[in-house]
Structures are given as C-alpha cells and as structure tokens.
Image: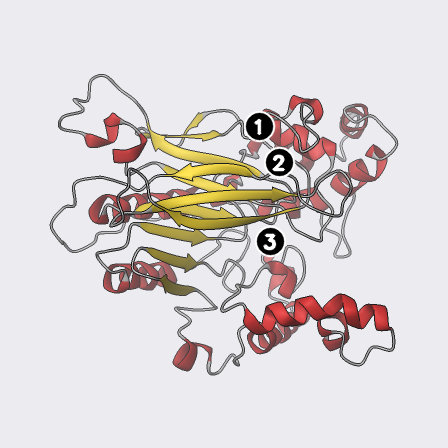
Amino acid sequence: YMRQWFGIGSSSPMEVDGQACFRQAVETIPYSFTPDSEIFAGYGSYSPTLQSSPVFSGIKTIGAKYYALFQAHTTPELAHREHGFLAEGYHSLKQLGPYTVLLTLDTRTERHLAGIVDRASYDQLFADLDARVPPTATNLIVVASNPVIFPRTKNFESLLRSASNSGITSIISYAVNGGSSKQARNDWISKDRFGEANAVTKLNDFWTCAVHRSERSFLVHSLQDFARRRSCRVTFVSGHVNCLSAAHFRTVQDAKYDARKYPEQRGFVSDFRSMIQLTVSGMVQEPADGLTLRAFHFAGKTAPFDAYTEEKMYHTFNMDVNQLPPPNNNQKLLGRRSYGIIIEHEFDNDRQRPGLLSFFYVEDETCVGTANPYIINIPPLRYPILPAQQQQLPPMQQQ
C-alpha cells in the first residue's frame, strides 16, 4: 500500500517520482471521501450471501482502516468523535466560507444490494443540515461517488441479466464494431472473480438502478424540501462512471400553475427543484468504451422523475476536444479522462448570493494536457424563504 500510493520502499526512481505528486496531494487536500476502490470494485452490490461472508467483512474493515489513516488522517475509532464524521461510516458536512456547504455521502460503508445509506443516517444528516448550514449559504454541493442523475438502466439491466440466454449475447456482439470492441463486450457479459455477472454488479451500483428507485426519490425529495425552505441551490458532484456528463432536475412547466403563486414555474433561478448534476471521469482509470456510452446515450431520454419534476441529460459536448463532432454524435456523455473545478461566481453583481461556475478539464488528443474547458453556469436560487419549521422528511419505502 505504501509503495503503490506513496512510493515509499520502492527501488525504482521512476516509481518514487511518479508518486511524489500524489503524496503531496494527500498531505494537503483537506478532505477526500471513500469510494468503493478503498475496498474493492462494486463492494455492497453483491448478493447478501457474499456481502455477509467473513472474507468480505474482513476486507471492508481493512479498507476502512487504511482510508481513515492515509486519507482522513485519523482512525476508525476517532473518526466520529474527534474528526467530525457523521452517522455510520464517513459522511461529512463541511462549510467552505459563508456561502457554500459541502455534503459528502459515504455510499459504501452501509451499502447493500437493496440500499445505499441507512434511514437513520439520512435522519442525522438532514438534521445536521438544518442545524449547521448558515442562513448565508446559497450553495449546497452534494458529493456522491455515483451520479444521482444519469441514464436510467432498467431496460439495460433486463437485457444484460438475460445475456446468457440463447441469442442474446450474439445481439450484443453485433451491436459493437471495431477491434477494441471485443474486450468491451467481454467486460459486460463475463463474470467476475466471485461468479457474479460484471454488468449486473456495475449497474447495481447506480442510483438509477431499479432497486434503488425508492431511496433515490427519498434523497431528492428531501433535498428539494431543504432547497425550498432555505432558498439554497443544490448541486450534485460525482464520478465513478468513467465518462463526463451533465444533467439536471427541474420543475415540469405547467400552465395551470400561476407563476405568481408558484415561483418554481418562473424558470431556473426561482425553481427549488432545479438541481444540476456534474459528473467527471477519472484521471487515471480507462474511460468507458463505445458500447457502454452508446447504451447510456440511448437510455438518457428526458423522463419524469415524479409528477412535478423531470430529469434530463444536457447536450454538453457538441464538440469533442479536437473540435470535431463527438464519437457517434453522443453529445451527452464523453469518454475521456478529466477533472472538474468548481468556483463561486457572482451573478448579476450580487455579492451576497453567489452561485457556482463549473469547469470540465478534459484530456486532449496528445494525452499530455487538457483542452479548453467545458463551462457550466449554476446561478443561485432565489426562492421566497419560508418561516423556519420542523422538517418532515418524506417516507422511504422498503424494497
């Protein structure tokens, strides 16, 4: 672990030099949250039999220990008492100045096949939001390893769960062309070291997976309520899907609702349901293959989230980094390595209510730098602030 991540104990000067920047980053970045890679890919999305086995439980304990030590600079015993982690696992609430608050969700420690975060943890997190977010805050950034707004996978799941049936794998095979497609195809229809289908385990990880539908609705409705009561813009930041994308929730525009009585009908600035999802791919991991991106592209249709909210993928990437149309004219998802930067930004010269400005920096064709960034504006929410009242979280149905 020390040699891989910090170059300590290595006999290779190249390996030591290559890890110097990472070591410096870990020493100076004030906070990082735990993805599944701290344990192993897909942890929590396997069958209950595997998840409860001594081997899985032991690996989880070791992963949590070294995440706490090397990235959070604490121990599992001290993490909550002395370092401010919340509920079970490593949830955290950080204030970045008077206007921006960062809520990071630990989506691994409590994860199981039918759930991501336990209800008791949600109750504590939203109670802390109400108690600790200052009235000056105009932005709540919710960090979750997987995107909350992403193409829905229901039909994709059904197809891949049946991939072993006669004829289905050949359909998938013919859907992909090119020399590199065979590996991509095999990654989806093969089984992993535990005998589980790779595709099913990957899709179980997603918030948009059918099994997490109720929990996803609960989370979004709770955040909508917080945004409405506090006039605070909610923005999601994620990764873990090996591609870039941007999407949003927004209020369904309906003429039967008078905009004078329903401010959310006036557009983005006064719409408490409007939340933008920013998703970046990894800086190291190989980007998603063409088959995966095409499948998500076709699944990424505008769809109703509920009776009052719709979700939609943005056509962010009308040009690739080489100034050519994106592969397969897929303007919703871009399969390149990247990183994101978010800064506060004053809209309409209002210094008391800044919004956010997001930059996607994407690896260029030479693989030695980044192209001009893709920029997304996130204006602050201007919704009439309601009198303080006891928060009533919506029910979360049990799967």
Q: Is residue 41 above or below residue 319?
A: below
Occupied quadrant, residue 181? top right
SS assignment at label 1: helix
Taking the image as shown, residue 121 lies to the left or right of residue 241, namely left
Cβ–Cβ below 8 Å for labels 3 and 1? no
Location of mark 3 (residue): 45
Q: Using the numbered discs, state the Cα–Cα distance from disc 2 to disc 3 in whole angstroms.
A: 14 Å
* Label 3 Cα crowd, 10 Å radius (few <14 / some 14-19 / many 20+): many
Seen at 83% across and 39% down, the residue is 183
Q: Is residue 114 above or below residue 3?
A: above
* Residue type indicated by callout 3: Ser
Mark with earlier residue (3, 1): 3
Instruction: Give residue 330's position: percent from left, percent from top.
Output: 63, 26
Can you name the residue that lies furthest to the front here? 349
* Label 2 Cα crowd, 10 Å radius (few <14 / some 14-19 / many 20+): some
How many dots with numbers? 3
Occupied quadrant, residue 382? top left
SS assignment at label 2: helix
Which numbered mark, 1 or 2, is in the foreground of this view? 1
SS assignment at label 3: loop
Location of mark 2 (residue): 157
Q: Which mark is residue 267?
A: none
Cβ–Cβ below 8 Å for labels 2 and 3? no
* Residue type indicated by callout 1: Ala
Q: Using the numbered discs, state the Cα–Cα distance from disc 1 to disc 2 in whole angstroms.
A: 11 Å
Mark with earlier residue (2, 3): 3
Instruction: Give residue 26's position: percent from left, percent from top.
Output: 60, 70
Taking the image as shown, residue 396 lies to the left or right of residue 203, namely left
Q: Using the numbered discs, state the Cα–Cα distance from disc 3 to disc 1 in whole angstroms.
A: 22 Å
Which numbered mark, 3 or 1, is in the foreground of this view? 1
Location of mark 1 (residue): 299
